[in-house]
Amino acid sequence: MKLLSGYTKEEKSWMMYDWANSAHSVIVVTILPIFFNSIATSQGMNTWGYATSIAMLVVALLAPVLGAFGDFKGWRKRLFTGFMLLGVIACAFLAVTPLLYGPEKPPAFLESLAFAILILYILSTIGFAGANLYYDSFLSDVTSDERMDKVSTMGYGLGYIGGSTIPLLIFLIMNLVLGSEYLLVCMSVAFGLTAVWWLVFSFPLLKNVRQKSYVEKQPHAVRKSLGKLFTTGREIFKNKALFVFLLSYFFYIDGVNTIIHMSTSYGDTLGLGQTSMLLALLLVQLLGLPFALLYIKLSARFGARAMVGVGIGIYCFITIFAFFISEAWHFWLLAVLVATSQGGIQALSRSMYGKMIPDKKRSGEFFGFYDIFGKFSAIMGPALVALVSGLAADAIRAGGTSMPEELIEKAAAPWGVLSLLLIFAVACVCYFIILPRYLKKKEGGRHA
């Protein structure tokens, strides 16, 4: 590929994992909620939000420990492989669930099926997030600080043109050719394809990427690793610029991830057409690469910090705009806005943090904390959307309305999404007001 000329073999192999795991990001995260909503008897969006929060909680609690273990010589790739396989196997089992569904099935069976889908979704998300922890920490092994912005962003770009686009396009073509009566079969194929795609395109990383930065395993390694967590935590807290960046990241990436995880569930609750929503999501993937390349060029000129700031501003507008959407074309416009910054803000945040790490040999430990900030934030956002939309629905019911339950949930859902603006507001204060002060002090101290 001419697009990848100038990159080393290790950089390309590392970036290919974004191509591999992006299939989960679009197929499981966006199509599965639509299937689940068709099975759930009520409050599908709320239940999905809480399930996402549970999955993120598990990973967040494990992240620092897993990150510390990943710093031992030879362990990073083993742990990466274990979590990747967990996600792949969960997706393979998800492929069976659409074939078991039928509206004529007893309610008790449908409840059990919905519960099984939630469990498999949680397991696939844990596998996805756990593998990403080690994938991110491999970044300092495959490239230099000077190339991190470019390599990290190009990884997201490959994800858009590969795993995010091709499996979704196959699903949409199958659905178009076979017709809506074979929708469940198409979903089954899509989930199965996600498992195969994820596994096959992980091989370049497994074959060509080596753990160069590590610490030697010593006696009582587990106890010592747990002790190091507190040391690393104190080190991060004392490094005020690094700590404030993580704090701002905690909030803004929460909003980004919540919009990713809840978008189709939200659109389905509003009654938007499923095919139209999925085509809009395909548009996000098609536009993702050119905008990721644009972020690379602009970050080279204006700096990664400035471009992450642009992304935060765009997502603030997205949150406000999402409150007012009511028609399919609104969702399409929302998709274009998301496409402008979704990959760029995530990729540049990862590379910004990678360059700020004071000790590259302990990148697993530091990325463990990066991951815990990201995953704990991913607990808060979906839960907040579910909570606020639930409270809004209760308020509507308390008013003595005669609206059917479906319309009550439709009226309440926008308030849940709007609540994300509170999270972005805190992120803006941390990122635009507090962080620059500490960065100036740090730069001043370096020149002194």
Image (spheres, helix red, strand yellow):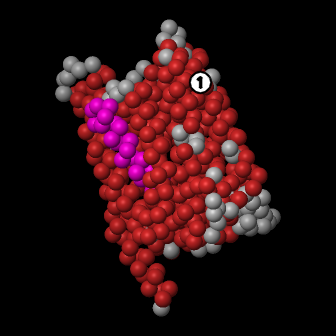
- In the rendered image, residue 28 lying in the magenta stretch gets the answer no
Label 1 is placed on what type of residue? Ser
Dot 1: element: helix
Question: Where is residue 274, by image quadrant?
Answer: top left
Q: Taking the image as drawn, is residue 446 in sight?
A: yes
For the stretch drawn in magenta, the main secondary structure is helix
- Side of 97 relative to 379 (left or right): right
- In the rendered image, residue 342 lying in the magenta stretch gets the answer yes
Image height of 42 relative to 365, above or below? above
Q: Which residue lies under the disc numbered 1?
A: 188
Q: Residues within 10 Å of mark 1 (few under 14, many from 20)?
A: many
Residue 208, how many percent across, how many down?
75, 55
Q: Taking the image as drawn, is residue 59 in sight?
A: no
Question: Where is residue 38, by image quadrant?
Answer: top left
Image height of 266 relative to 345, above or below? above
User: Who's the residue at 68% across and 44% down the image?
Assistant: 201
Question: Where is residue 49, by image quadrant?
Answer: top left
Q: Residue furthest right?
A: 219
Residue 55, how many percent across, how many down?
54, 41
Residue 39, how many percent across, how many down?
47, 20
How many numbered marks, from 0 up? Answer: 1
Magenta residue span: 325-345
Q: Residue furthest front?
A: 2
Q: Residue furthest top?
A: 104
Residue 438, how many percent across, how many down?
42, 76
- Side of 133 relative to 334 (left or right): right
Image height of 347 relative to 159, above or below? below
User: Who's the residue at 65% across and 38% down the image?
Assistant: 197
User: Who's the residue at 56% across and 47% down the image?
Assistant: 159
